[in-house]
Image: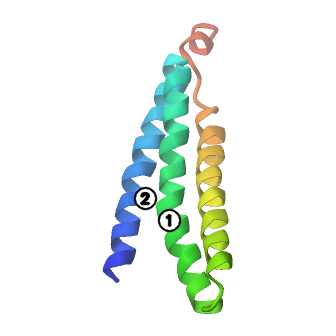
Amino acid sequence: MFNFLFALLATYVCYKRGLAYMLESRILASRKAERRSYVMFLLAGVFLGDFIGLTAAFHYLPNMPLLQATVGTLCSILCGEAFFYYNKRAVQKIPTVQERKNY
């Protein structure tokens, strides 16, 4: 139970920091902040994806360590990419300073 709470806490911290970097990249048009947000979202995906993927893999594939590692890795990558692209689409709806001046 504590492992789950630690995984959720680490995911939450990385996710919130990634979202802050994503907003900064949108408002200030900073490529550096966008790369940082990508890294933070991938870290959030690693924490959550490894916990979910490895828990399921250990339960359903107890004697296949290579397949367990593959499932954990794929789940981590998919979670991180999903976090990044979902938030990127949501943040793109926020008007930039240049778009506000056109009103």
**Residue 100 x, y percent position in the rendering:** 57, 14
Residue kind at label 2, given as amino acid type: Thr
Residue at 54 percent across and 13 percent down: it is: 97
Which residue is under mark 1? Answer: 48
Residue 6 image-quadrant placement: bottom left
Q: Which quadrant, please, contains the N terminus?
A: bottom left
Would you say 81 lies left or right of 37 here?
right
Picture layout, residue 85 above or below residue 70: above
Would you say 11 lies left or right of 90 here?
left
Residue kind at label 1, given as amino acid type: Leu
Q: Label 2 near label 1: C-beta < 8 Å? A: yes
Residue 20 image-quadrant placement: top left
Residue at 64 percent across and 48 percent down: it is: 86
Residue at 64 percent across and 8 percent down: it is: 102
**Residue 42 x, y percent position in the rendering:** 54, 49
Q: Earlier in the sequence, mark 1 or mark 2?
A: 2
**Residue 30 x, y percent position in the rendering:** 52, 19
Give neighbour class at mark 2: few <14, some 14-19, many 20+ (Cα, 10 Å).
many
Residue at 61 percent across and 72 percent down: it is: 69
Looking at the rendered structure, the secondary structure element under dot 1 is: helix
Separation (CA) of disc 1 from disc 2 = 6 Å
Q: Which mark is residue 17?
A: none
Residue at the extreme left = 2
Picture layout, residue 56 above or below residue 11: below
Give neighbour class at mark 1: few <14, some 14-19, many 20+ (Cα, 10 Å).
many
Which residue is under mark 2? Answer: 11
17 and 93: which one is in front? 17
Q: Which quadrant, please, contains the C terminus?
A: top right
